[in-house]
Image (spheres, rainbow, N blue to C red):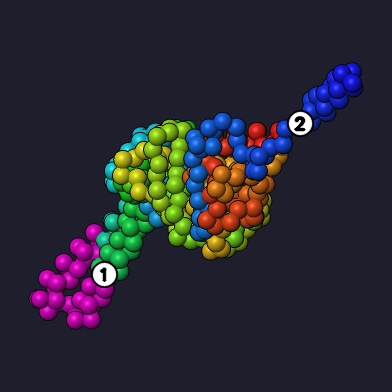
Amino acid sequence: MRKVYLMIVAALAVVACGRNPQPEDGQENSPRGNLAARVKTVKAVEGQQTRELTFAGRVTANPDLTVSYSSLVNGIIERTYFALGDRVTKGQVMLDIRSAELSALQSELTALESSLQVAERQLKSAETMFADQMLSEKEYLEAQVQVRQAKAAYEKAKADIALYGNSKGGGVFSVLAPASGYVITKKGAAGGTVFAESEPLFAIAGLREVWVMTNIYAGNLQFVGEGMEASITSVSYPNEVFRGKISALAQVFDPEDKVLKASIVLPNEEMKLKPGMSVVVRLRDQSKEKTVSLPSEAVIFDNDAYFVVIRKGNEFTVREVVVAGSHGGTTYFTSGVEPGEEIVAKNQLLIYNELKSK
């Protein structure tokens, strides 16, 4: 009898050792210890998604504040008085050009000046003779007409020469700065040959206001429009943001680059932005469609997918979500999160790993 009793006790002990303790209700979704008390949650909210688009850009001079000079005659540059980047004032001598064409014009001007002087002397003589009744009125009027014609021809030739610059004689004329500003392009040097109406020898621009040009690709065109606010940054001023708006968006794609050119007007009173400088352009687009959003810190990225930890009372669940985009510390979702749901935003990775291991 004692032997049978011992065998029954041993069998019960074996059965008891072979069973695992059953978890309490909800324990499979509850973190161990007091971790649940140390989490922070945020509520998912519904709103409009803000999208940030980033493009490469380049600073250029404002075309409306830029004046260029092209030679009107063929000739040779004798001397230049400026360098690229110089600040110049209107009327300042920029360069001297020697031209055979100008030499011919100067000779013509000299001849016309002599003709005018002769006509004026003849008119003076005609006035005296007309007063003494030694000359008819018709002859006197003809003398007046000759002076007017000679003067008109002389003034025209003088104006034509003035178009080329300030004549120094001997077929040499000085080109004067047509406006005040900064020299942004320079072509040619002393001894170089110039041709009439060829590419500009120099360009002067006011830089108190500049443009930033950027390329908009077809895939981003739906998000970009005139009047959009733009933030401009540069490696030259890493802690400074320049703000402007898209002033113009081309209506025809560039045939070579397959892009649309967009121009952004920026004030430049401190003269920090220089033509040719590379910048980064950021455009903010606010979608008209409503989406659910959360602070980006609440989102977990694992195995090429995004997850969030949802809290409902003392229960925690992991849910995969589909991200539409992120901007300024906020992540937007197309599915997986409903407005008003509580999402763990602190220690969520610990909870995620614990629930994942079960």
Q: Disc 2 residue type?
A: Asn
Q: Is residue 225 left or right of residue 92?
A: right
Q: Is residue 305 visible?
A: yes
Is residue 45 or residue 197 the one in the foreground? 45
136 in magenta: yes
Residue that numbered label 1 is attached to:
148
Say which residue appears at 58% left-offset and 56% top-offset.
338
Give the farthest residue toward the bottom: 137
Q: How many marks?
A: 2
Q: Quadrant of the C terminus?
A: top right
Is residue 27 or residue 123 the one in the foreground? 27
Say which residue appears at 60% left-offset and 45% top-offset.
315
Is residue 86 or residue 52 the one in the foreground? 52
Residue that numbered label 2 is attached to:
20
Q: Is residue 45 left or right of residue 84?
A: right
Q: Percent from the top left, x then y, of residue 347? A: 54, 34
The boundaries of the magenta stretch are: 117-145
Q: Is residue 18 left or right of residue 349?
A: right
Q: Percent from the top left, x then y, of residue 241? A: 40, 41
